[in-house]
Amino acid sequence: MAPLTTELSTPLTGTYQQPIGLFIDGKWVEGVDKKKFEVINPSTEEVITSICEGTEKDIDLAVAAARKAFEGEWKKTTPQQRGNYLLKLADLAEKNLDLLAAVESLDNGKSITNARGDVGAVVGCLRYYGGWADKIEGKTIDISPDMFHYTRSEPIGVCGQIIPWNFPLLMLAWKIGPALATGNTVVMKTAEQTPLSALVFTQFIEQAGFPAGVFNLVSGYGKTAGAALSSHMDVDKIAFTGSTVIGRTIMKAAASSNLKKVTLELGGKSPNIVFEDADIEEAINWVNFGIYYNHGQCCCAGTRIYVQESIYDNFIAAFKKRAEENKVGDPFNEETFQGPQVSQLQYDRIMSYIQSGKDEGATVLTGGERLGNKGYFIKPTIFSDVRPDMKIMQEEIFGPVCAISKFKDEEDVINLAHDTAYGLAAAVHTKNINTAIRVSNSLKAGTVWVNCYNMLHHAVPFGGYKESGIGRELGEAALSNYTQNKSVAIKLY
């Protein structure tokens, strides 16, 4: 059998050995059908390499391995030992931060500075849940003298986890942290656009010493491997981060199979609200960061910008200038803020939304076109003169495109903010704490930032209202996604 690695290189690290196999039951394998698929560099549109493609047969093997581990060695592992595995994994990720960041930039196209930030957040997340592992507790409930009641928080079992292409490593950590800390086993499917960094990361799971079958990684396509995982009769839980459209499909598959438990972190069309008393310079910087961070490929991106009418004209002039200062280009250039979009498909999708905005009568203040003639680069784009019913105001674009509109007062902007099917995040910019609290409490969103944006942390729950998802990731709240409560009642004699 050919070696299941290939030699690749990045401008940051030079050459390195890239795993290309599937990781099932503690072993690197080709996959039953020995199929492969190409991975494309979004900066150059060239093939980086080909990796092994998992199919339904490989999902079956991975689930069987996860079940065996869950019922066997992993169940015998103490909570403190589980925590130690996660802490060791965090140490290995930190030690190899530059390699992981470089592979993320190569594969995903995100700027190297953002990629380093992602890996730092991975380390923090794993350490956080490593600390939680031996603190999962039940309680006693006093009902009567002749009865002893207590509860236990028990792991759910085999967890299928499907992660997206916008934050491959970070979403991996968000998923495995609480799942492994609480004693579950995992079968993970990565996005077909960005499988490389998770494959490198899996080497460190090996090195950390996790028992075979506790973590299994299958690279493959959503319509085959993802569908097989979602509908598998021996998977107890499915967790997915991605679009609302695919989230619906996964929920249907979960319901029509074994009614497996579901966590969904889905799309958004988040409002970013600027009141007239805000620190305008600070607000512009945060609005810019809120939409253009990670190339606009954020589920919580602040794509709908509402500015109070008294400062609207001055704001859009200054915001246009700020957006045009964003450095777009080579992700390995330390000065780059925005790299390419992740794929040809995503590039085409974004450009079609830009065309839709133009066709529906919105004004392009800046951007609205490709940058250069190689790679999936799009200039930061701002639309003004928009109506609430336009596609660019209603649908998730998932790119460096925002729409800006004016509002009169609190009541007006809250109504505008709610005029969407989504409810993932929002932001409020004001110097008035009363306004900040009143509006934050009124907004139908899982996260509201005040005078900032995208300030996520592994200790703080994250998730959506409305069609933006089910359940919460991060924080103590995520532990409930991966545990089930058992009540025990003992008759005393």
Image: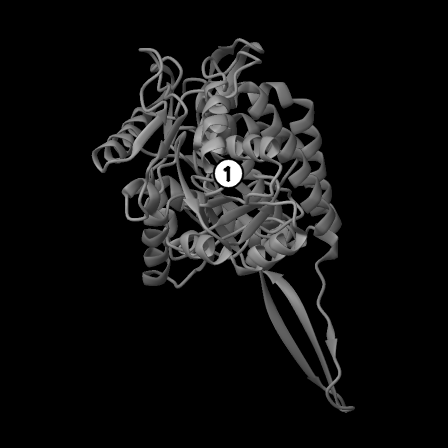
Color style of the picture: one colour
Tell me what residue is drawn at x 57 percent, y 55 percent. 440
Number of marks? 1
| Coordinates of residue 464 in the picture (x, y in percent) | 48, 53
**Image location of residue 141, percent across then percent down:** 73, 79
Closest to the observer, 468 or 85? 468
Give the percent coordinates (x, y) of residue 130: 70, 44
Asked if residue 4 shows in the view, the reply is no
Identify the residue shown where x is 41% and y is 17%. Answer: 2
Q: Quadrant of the C terminus?
A: bottom right
- For the residue carrying disc 1, how many other residues have a C-alpha within 10 Å: few (<14), some (14-19), or many (20+)? some
Q: Quadrant of residue 91?
A: top right
2 shown above or below 346: above
Q: Residue at x 53, y 60 (%)?
A: 442
Residue type pointed to by label 1? Ile
Give the residue displayed 62% in from the left and 62% down from the top: 154
Is 378 placed above or below 313 here?
Answer: above
Q: Quadrant of the N terminus?
A: top left
Residue in the foreground of this view, choosing between 458 and 132? 458
| Residue 361 in sight here | yes
In the picture provided, is 202 more to the left or to the right than 20? right
Place residue 36 in its image quadrant.
top left
x, y percent for residue 409 = 49, 53
| Mark 1 element type | loop
Q: Is residue 214 left or right of residue 86?
A: left
Seen from the viewer's position, the closer of residues 100 and 166 is 166
Instruction: Name which quarter of the figure residue 281 lies in.
Output: top right
Residue 312 shown left or right of residue 450 in the figure = left
| Residue that badge 1 annotates | 311
Q: Residue furthest front?
A: 310
Q: Nearer the viewer, residue 369 or 107?
A: 369
